Image (cartoon, rainbow, N blue to C red):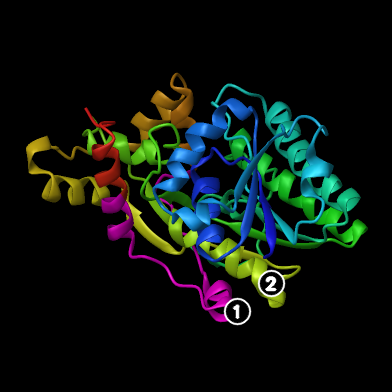
Amino acid sequence: MKKVVVTGGTGFVAGWVIVEFLNAGYEVSTSVRSLKKADRLEREIAKAVSKEEMANLSFFEADLTSDKNWVKNIQGAAGIIHVASPMGNGTQSVEELVNVAKNGALTVLKAAKEAGVKRVVMTSSQAASTPMHGSNAVLDENFWTDINNPDLDPYRISKVESEKAAWRFARENDLELTTVLPGAIFGPILSDKAVSSNEVLLRLLNGMPLTPHVPLEISDVRDLAHLHRLAFENPVAIGKRYLAASQVLQMAEVEKIYQTNFPYKRIKVRMMPNWGLKFAAKFVTNLRALVPMLDRKYRHTTDAAENDLGWTQHKPEETVMDAAKMLIKYGLDK
C-alpha cells in the first residue's frame, strides 16, 4: 500500500484530500500543528470513509514554521500533497505573508529532499494567475501574475512568490513537482471548524445588505481533491501547473440560487456600487481581496487538467447548494 503525506490536515481542502486518498486505497499520514487536534480530525474524516479506510490514517505533529518532525515523518512516503498555506487575515504586510507562505513551502520541499521523496503535488492558487485589471483574456497555465500589478493584495502576491520559490527549489533539487491552482474553493464542509472560503457563501446565505459585482471562479473542493490525486498518479503531470477553476457564478447569482431554494430565509438581492466596495474596503480588511475582482472579465481554462488527466467538475450551482446544505446542517447560518 502506498503512503502519502498530506500537510495541514485540519484545513478544509486537506480534509477532502485525505478522504480522496483514503477512498483510493492509500495510507495517509497528515500533519497537524498539535496532536490535540487529531481526535477531532479523526471524527470528521470518519464521516466520509469506511472503517477499513480509516485504519490507514495517521497523524504527526509539525508546523510549517519549523523544520522539526518533517523529515522523519516523510521518509518512506511515495509522495507529499502539500496543501497547507496561510490565508492571512488582511492585516499582514506583503513581506510578512510572502515570507510565511514561501518559507512554509520550502520547509516541506527541503524535508522531501532530505527524506529522499521526489514526488510533490502542491496547492497553489489562481491568485498566481491574475492579469491586469480590464483584461478579458482566457488564461492557461503559462500565465503568471505580475507581482508589480497595483491591484494585488498581500495574499495574491504571497501565492505567486511561494509557487515560484517551489518551482525554483524543485528544479535545483530534481524534485518531481506539480502545482494545482484553484479558484474560490467551495463545497460541503466536514466540520464547523473548517469553513474556510465557504465563509463567502455563508454571508450570501444569510443575505448581504449589499452584494458586490464580483464573479466567483469556482472550484468544488471534492473535484480539487480528486485533481490532486490524478496529478499525483499520472507521470504526465510532473513539471506542470494545472488550473482548477473555469466555471463562474456572480455573487448575485449565488444569492438568487439561495433565494429560490431557501425561501424561508427571505433573502433580498441588492447590488453594491463598485465605489461602495472600494470605500468599504479601506476600513474592512476582509473586503480588500474583492476589489481586484470587481467586474472581472478574464477567465481561466481547465483544458489541461481535462485533457491530460480526464478531470471533470461539478456544476457550480451544485457546488454552492451542497455547501449551503452543510452550512445549515452545522447550524452556521443565522
Numbered range of the magenta stretch: 293-322
Query: Considering the numbered disc 2 on the image, is that residue within a helix, a strand or a loop?
Result: helix
The image quarter in which residue 22 lies: bottom right
Is residue 277 found left or right of 28 in the rendered image?
A: left
In the displayed structure image, the side of residue 21 where residue 233 appears, left or right: right
Whole-percent x, y for residue 150 in the image: 62, 39
Image spot of residue 31 (x, y percent): 66, 39
- Quarter of the figure with the C terminus: top left
Where does residue 111 sit, x and y in percent of width and height?
84, 45
Q: CA distance from mark 2 to mark 1?
A: 8 Å
Which residue is situated farthest in the top direction here? 283
Which mark is on residue 237? 2
- Please determine whether, in this image, residue 275 is positioned above or below residue 306: above
314 part of magenta stretch: yes
- Type of residue at label 2? Ala
Up/down of 274 relative to 222, above or below: above
Q: Residue at x 89, y 62 (%)?
A: 174
Q: Residues within 10 Å of mark 1 (few under 14, many from 20)?
A: some
Kind of residue indicated by mark 1: Asp
- Check contact, mark 2 vs mark 1: CB within 8 A: yes
Would you name the residue on which mark 1 appears? 308
Asked if residue 292 is positioned above or below residue 48 in the image, the reply reads: above
Kindly tell me whether residue 266 is visible in this rendering: no
Residue 88 within the segment the image draws in magenta: no
Can see residue 109? yes
Q: Depth check: 35 or 295 in front?
A: 35
| Quadrant of the image occupied by residue 63 | top right
